[in-house]
Amino acid sequence: MKLIFMYLFGILLLATSALALAPLFSSPTKINGSYIVVYRDEIPETTVSLHKTALLKMYSSHKILFEYKKVLNGFSAILTPQGLNYIRNAEGVNYVEEDQIATAFDVKQATCNIQDNAPWGLGRISTGGIPLNSNQYKYDTEGSGVKAYIVDSGIYLENVQFGGRAQFGANFVLGESNGDLNGHGTHVAGIVGGRDYGVAKKVTLVAVKVLGQNGSGSYSGVIGGIDWIATDATPNKDTANLSLGGSPSLALDTAINNLVSKNGIFTVVAAGNDNQDACNYSPSRAALAFSVGSISQPAEGVYTDPRSYFSNQGSCVQIFAPGEAIPSAWIGDPTAFRTLSGTSMASPHVCGAAALILGDGPVDTPGRVGSEIISSATPGTVVNINPDSPNLVLFAGCEPSKL
């Protein structure tokens, strides 16, 4: 009997080898080894049954999961690569699709966490509608499992805002210790992921020190930091923030673009503080950098977001976020904080928002993260911008209402 089956199976293989290979449709959320096999409508059940029998005889690891007779003509099965190849060559198969994960579309508002007496910047980015002012930060994810690389002056790891989630990564300032001697990097890190001041309250913060005690560094050091991130970070899972910049640099722009395109790291940069075109600076002009301009706090009863007087603007900016009078962590004492202004403060709001997205589901590409940030942004409220600038304000809350 076994010899007869093998003979018939051999005939089946010969018969199907001359047929066109049925297409295989892949999925980013595939279930490994599980496939949905769809036949043309006119293929009889006897042919489908013959193929299922052949698969089960071929390998003991093959398993038919579900049979479809009404809405589809076919079945689903656990298959080896050899089984997949056989069924794609089988008579009448229209296509094969990788099985994938289905998830419930829950309403985020139902699981909102609320931080009362939050900094105005956090209140603003979680308010998609009127009024624009709020002292509540409403969020439903916290960036757990994501690393945010802070390319800056370092991080004062002992500040209570970080709760042990901040760590030293690398130092590219020659002759200076690994700690933050300036404060700027600690402040930025606090906005990304501080307990009270941060957008993503469970993100891991990694210090990549490229600026020294005086707040400056070299482009060669910055590129060194970017290169180090490319070796340390998890592609399509982590994010980076650069609240720094200067004159145009092809080398720096290329490093940023490659960190995004070749290494899958969503990279946020400050647009700059010269009230000029952001396209005249690096890395804000880098094609794949997500460049952020600054807005100031709206006055009570005013339903517009003023662009900060210092903020760069133009077509190289992707979005605006709060950047004036932003409180955050500081150096020198575990409870130290300070209030600063600049696009350096706007950028980490967006980096934190990226961490929320990356921590909220499966691995996501930088392009998809950027698209989600843009599509969820609050439109049409920014004033005092030129026509080339996007009229978008970051939204990173769980409140679904928008203007």
Image (cartoon, rainbow, N blue to C red):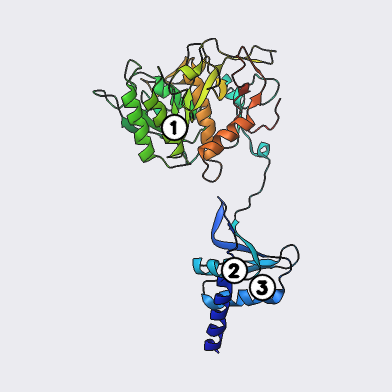
Label drawn at residue 257: 1
Disc 3, SS = helix
**Label 3 Cα neighbours within 10 Å, binned few <14 / some 14-19 / many ≥20:** many
Question: Dot 3 corresponds to which residue?
Answer: 48
The answer, for residue 127, to whether it is visible in the render is no
Q: Nearer the viewer, residue 161 or 259?
A: 259
Q: Residue furthest top?
A: 309
In the image, residue 303 lies at what x, y percent?
69, 16
Looking at the rendered structure, the kind of residue marked 3 is Val
Where the N terminus falls, by quadrant?
Answer: bottom right
**Label 1 Cα neighbours within 10 Å, binned few <14 / some 14-19 / many ≥20:** many
**Label 2 Cα neighbours within 10 Å, binned few <14 / some 14-19 / many ≥20:** few
Relative to 336, say whether 352 is above or below: below
In the image, residue 168 lies at what x, y percent?
34, 32
Q: Earlier in the sequence, mark 1 or mark 2?
A: 2
Q: Residue furthest left?
A: 175
Q: Nearer the viewer, residue 55 or 150?
A: 55
Q: CA distance from mark 2 to mark 3?
A: 16 Å
Q: Is residue 377 left or right of residue 193?
A: right
Q: Which residue does the image show at 64% across and 33% down from the upper left? A: 398
Relative to 32, say whether 157 is above or below: above
Q: CA distance from mark 1 to mark 2?
A: 44 Å
In the image, residue 385 lies at what x, y percent?
60, 14
How many marks the image carries: the answer is 3
> Would you say the residues marked 2 and 3 are in contact, meaning their CB atoms lie under 8 Å apart?
no
Q: Earlier in the sequence, mark 1 or mark 3?
A: 3
Quarter residue 64 falls in: bottom right
Question: Dot 2 corresponds to which residue?
Answer: 19
